[in-house]
Amino acid sequence: MINFTATYTDQYQLSMAQVYFENGQKEHPAVFDYYFRKLPFDGGYAIFSGLEDLLEILENLKFSEEDLAYLKDQNYSEAFLDYLKNFKFSGNIMAAKEGDVLFPNRPILQVEATIIEAQLIETILLNLLNFQTLIATKASRMRLVAKDSVLLEFGLRRAHGPGGYYASRAAIVGGFDGTSNVVAGKNFDIPVSGTMAHSFIQSYDDEITAFRAFSQVRPKDCVLLVDTYDTLKSGLPNAIKIGKEMEVLGEKLAGIRLDSGDLAYLARESRKMLDDAGLNYVKIAASNQLDEYVIKSLLEQNAPIDIFGVGTNLVTGDPDAALDGVYKLTASNGIPRLKISESLSKVTIPHKKQVYRLMNAKGELIGADAITMREEEEVSRIYDPQEILKSLPVKSYKTEVLLHLVMKNGKRTEESRSLKEIAAYSRERLDSLPMEYKRFDNPHIYKVGISKMLKKEREKLMKKYKK
C-alpha cells in the first residue's frame, strides 16, 4: 500500500512551514478545525469514517532519508531540513467518534499542535477523512433501502487508483457486509466474496462445462454467473443442472448472479425456476451499475434479490465524487483567529470548541447540535451561524458531548476499535436519527447552532478584521 511518510502533503504546506521555521515561529501553538459545509448526495446526514487510519498514520509520521534528499533538491534550507529530520506529530486531537452521524458546519475534529505540525498534517487529514466519510455516507444510504439484504462492495476495479482500498473499509463503516477486495479483507478483517467473470465461462467450449468445473473446485461458495449467453434459456437451466449434481455429492449451490438486463423481471423468473426445481435455498445476487435508487426501485418491485453487489457508484461517491471538508485555523499563538468572507457561511468560528448533541427528556434527538466555547458549562440558547436572527432555546434539553480527546502529545489515548465495532456503532447512531433526516427527497435540515458567547466572540473579531 501507500507509504505514508510526511511528504504525503502539498507543496504549500512545506513552503509555509519553512517560513514559520525561518521566522522563529516553529513552537507557536495553533488550533485547527476540520468540518464540511455541505452534505453529500442532497441528503440529511453524513457518516464519519477514516479516523482510526488517520491516528495510526499520525503516530508514525516522519520524513525518511529519501524524503529529505528529495526536499534538498527543492531548494529548502539546510537548517529547515535538519528540523524536519526529527519531525514528529506531538499534538492533541479532539474528535467525534468514528461512525457517528455528522452535519455541516460543526467541528468534527480539532487539532492543537505547533503551527508547523498542524499545517503539515492538513493534507493527509483531509485526504483520508473527506474520502472515507463520503463513501461511508453513500454506503449507509444503500443500507437504509436494502434493509436486511446482503450488500457487497465490488468496486476496486472502477475505483480511483489506491482509493479503492479505503473505499472498501468505508463501505463497511456505512453498513456493507463484505468486499471483493482481498487486500482490504486481509488488512481490515472484512469478509471477502467473489463469483466468476464472463471470461471464465467464455474460456470453456460451453456454459455447462464451465459451471461444472467451478462447482467441483469451489463447492462451498459456488455462485454461478448466468447471463453470459441467455439468462433464462441457458444460464438458469444449466445452473439448475449443476445444483442438482451438487446435491448428489452432498453439496449445495450457493447462488446465481444476474449482471445485465431487467433485473427485477429476471430475478422473479429465476426465483420461480429455482423453486420449481426444488432449489429454494439458492440465493439470487444482482450487480450492474447499482446505487441506492436502483436498489430501492428493485425492492419496491418486489424483486426477490438476496444479495446486491455494488461497484462504481459506491466507490466513486457518484454523483458528488468529493466531500467539501475544510481545515481552518481558529487560534494561533494563543490568539483567536477568523477568516472573513463576503458569504457568512464561509466566515469561520474562532477558539477551541466543544460540540453537544441535544436530546429531550426521553433521550430522543431533537435535531440540533450546539457548538460552544470549550470552557462553557451551560448554554441556554443557540444561534444559526449563517442566519443570525434565527435561534433556539436549549436550556431544557439533555446534552451529549461529541468531541473526545483521541490523541495527546502525539499518542493515542485509547485502544483502537475494530471495524466491526465502528460499523455497529454507526448503525446504532443512524438508527437513533429520525426518519425525516434520512429520506432521499427533501430531508429535514438538522440544526447546528453556536452559543451566545461564541456568537459574540465571532462578531467582535469580524469587526476587528474588517477595520
Image (cartoon, rainbow, N blue to C red):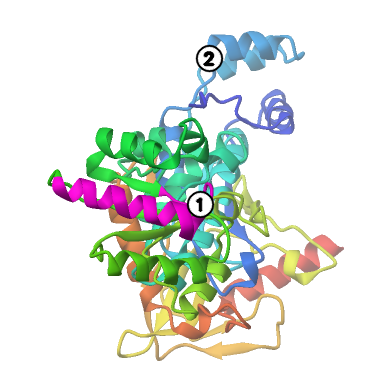
Determine whether the residue tagged by mark 2 lies in a helix, strand or loop: loop
Q: Residue at x 48, y 39 (%)?
A: 197
Which x, y percent locates residue 164?
Answer: 53, 40
10 Å neighbourhood of mark 2: few (<14), some, or many (≥20)? Answer: some
State the count of labels: 2
Which x, y percent locates residue 111?
Answer: 52, 47
Q: Nearer the viewer, mark 2 or mark 1?
A: 1
Seen as rendered, the residue at the extreme left is 250
Check residue 239 for magenta coloring. yes
Q: Which residues are magenta?
A: 225-248
Secondary structure character of the magenta stretch overall: helix
**Quarter in which the C terminus is drawn:** bottom right
In the figure, is residue 412 to the left or right of 290? left
Any mark on residue 23, and which? none
Q: Nearer the viewer, residue 323 or 162?
A: 162
Q: Which quadrant of the structure image shows residue 448? A: bottom right
In the figure, is residue 254 to the left or right of 116? left
Q: Which quadrant of the structure image shows residue 428? A: bottom left
Residue 120 vs 284, above or below: the answer is above
Residue 78 vs 290, above or below: the answer is above
Which x, y percent locates residue 239?
Answer: 35, 51
Q: Earlier in the sequence, mark 2 or mark 1?
A: 2
10 Å neighbourhood of mark 1: few (<14), some, or many (≥20)? Answer: many
Any mark on residue 64, and which? 2
Residue 456 vs 7, above or below: the answer is below
Residue 141 visible to the viewer: yes
Cα–Cα span, label 2 and label 1: 51 Å
Determine whether the residue tagged by mark 1 lies in a helix, strand or loop: loop
Amino acid residing under circle 2: Ser
Q: Which quadrant of the structure image shows residue 28? A: top right
Residue 405 visible to the viewer: no
Residue with the mark numbered 1: 227
